[in-house]
Amino acid sequence: MRVKIIHKYFFRELLISFVLSITAFNMILMMERILKFSMLLSGVGASAYDFLKIILLVQPQLFLLTIPMSLMTSVLFTYGRLNADNEIIVLKAVGVSFAALTRPVFFFGFLCFCASAFNSFYLGPATSTSLREDITNIIINKSPMAIKEGVFYTLFKNVVVLVREKPSDRAIKDVFIYDKRDDTRHWTIFAKEGSINVYGQGGIEFVLKNGEVFLPDNKSITKIAFGSYNMIIKFSPEITSQISELTPFEVLKRTKETTGEERISVFLEFHRRLTLPLLALIMSFFAPAFAMISAKTGKLGGLSLAMLVFLAYYSMLIYFEKLARTGGISHVAAGWIPFVSLLIISIYFFRKENSR
C-alpha cells in the first residue's frame, strides 16, 4: 500500500513537471513560426481568433520532438530532486528497489508513447492539412480587404498592386499592377476601375475595366488597350510540406512513386515517424538512471543535460540521414542506428543503477 502511495506521489510530480516542460519547449520552438505567421497574417487583416487557431494547429507538428524531450526533463527534475533530498536513499534503505521506484516512469512513458504514436499516425497529418487549408482560406478571403488606398500591396508573389481609390472592400479605382510572374516578360497594367473576387478554391481574380497593358521587349514596348480584363492569381502558401500531411502508411506508399534522392528522403521521413514516438519508451530506461548521476546539478543542470542528450541524438540522426542521401549507407541504417545506440546506452545505465 505504501509503494502505491509513493508511486502516486512520483506520478503527480512527473505530470506537473511534464506539463511545464512541454509548454516551455513548444513555446521556444514556436517563436520562429509565430514571427512568420504574424508577418503573413497581419498583412491580410487576420483576426486574433484566426491567429490563435493557427498556433493551435501547429502544436501537433512539434509534439513529435517535445514529448520525449519533456518526458526526460520531467524525470530529471523529479528524480534528481528526490535524490538530492536523500528521499531515494531512504526508500532504498527500507528495501524498495530502483526498478520499483521507476515504475511510475514506465507507466508515464507508455502514456507518452501512445500520445506520440497517435500524433504521428493521425493527429499530426490531420492538423497539417487543416493548417494549410485555413491559412490559404484566410489569405484568399481577406486579401481584398487588406489592400489599402495608396499603399503598395506585395503579398502576392511576384505581383505588386497599387490602388488609388477603394470605394468598398472589393471595388477599386485607378489601379496599377506590376506582374513579373513570367521571367521572360514583365507586365504593367493600368485600369480605371475594377473589383477583386475570390477565384475557385485557391486564387484571387482582378476584374479590370477600361485600361491598358504594357509589355516591354528588348527594344520596344507593346501597348494593348482593353475594355475588360480578368487577371487571376493562384495563391498557394508554402506553410507545410506536403509529406507532413501524410500518415506513415501513406508516406511508405509514396516511396513507390518517387525515385533517387527524393525516394531516400521519403524513406527517412517514414523512419522518423516510427522512431520518434519510440523515444518515449527509451527515456523510461535512460532518464531515471541518468537522473541519479546528475542529481547534484540542480534543476537548471537537469534541463541543460536533457537538451545536450537530445542535441547529441538529433545531430547523430541528421549526420546519418545526410550519409544516406549521398549513398554512404542505407536509409534503414540511417533511420535506426541513432535509435538503437541510444537504446543500448539506456539499458546499460539502467542495469548499472539497478544493480547498486
Image (tube, rainbow, N blue to C red):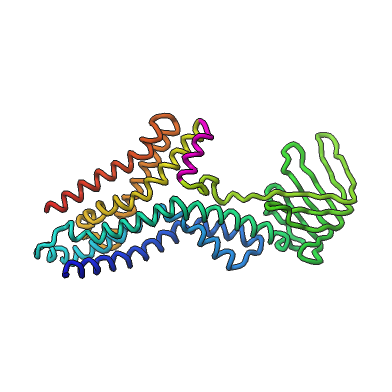
Q: Please identify the dominant SS of the magenta region.
A: helix
**In the rendered picture of this protein, how many numbered marks are placed on residues?**
0
User: Is residue 297 toward the left or the right of residue 122 in the image?
Assistant: left
The front one of 327 and 162 is: 327
- Residue 356 horizontal/vertical position (percent): 11, 53
- Residue 148 horizontal/vertical position (percent): 74, 63
Q: Please report the bounds of the magenta region as a residue range.
A: 248-259
Quarter holding residue 218: top right
- Residue 151 horizontal/vertical position (percent): 74, 60
User: Is residue 229 toward the left or the right of residue 291 in the image?
Assistant: right
Answer yes or no: is residue 68 visible: no
The front one of 205 and 189 is: 205
User: Residue at position x 21%, y 54% from top?
Assistant: 289
The front one of 65 and 126 is: 126
User: Residue at position x 20%, y 67% from top?
Assistant: 4
- Residue 51 horizontal/vertical position (percent): 57, 64
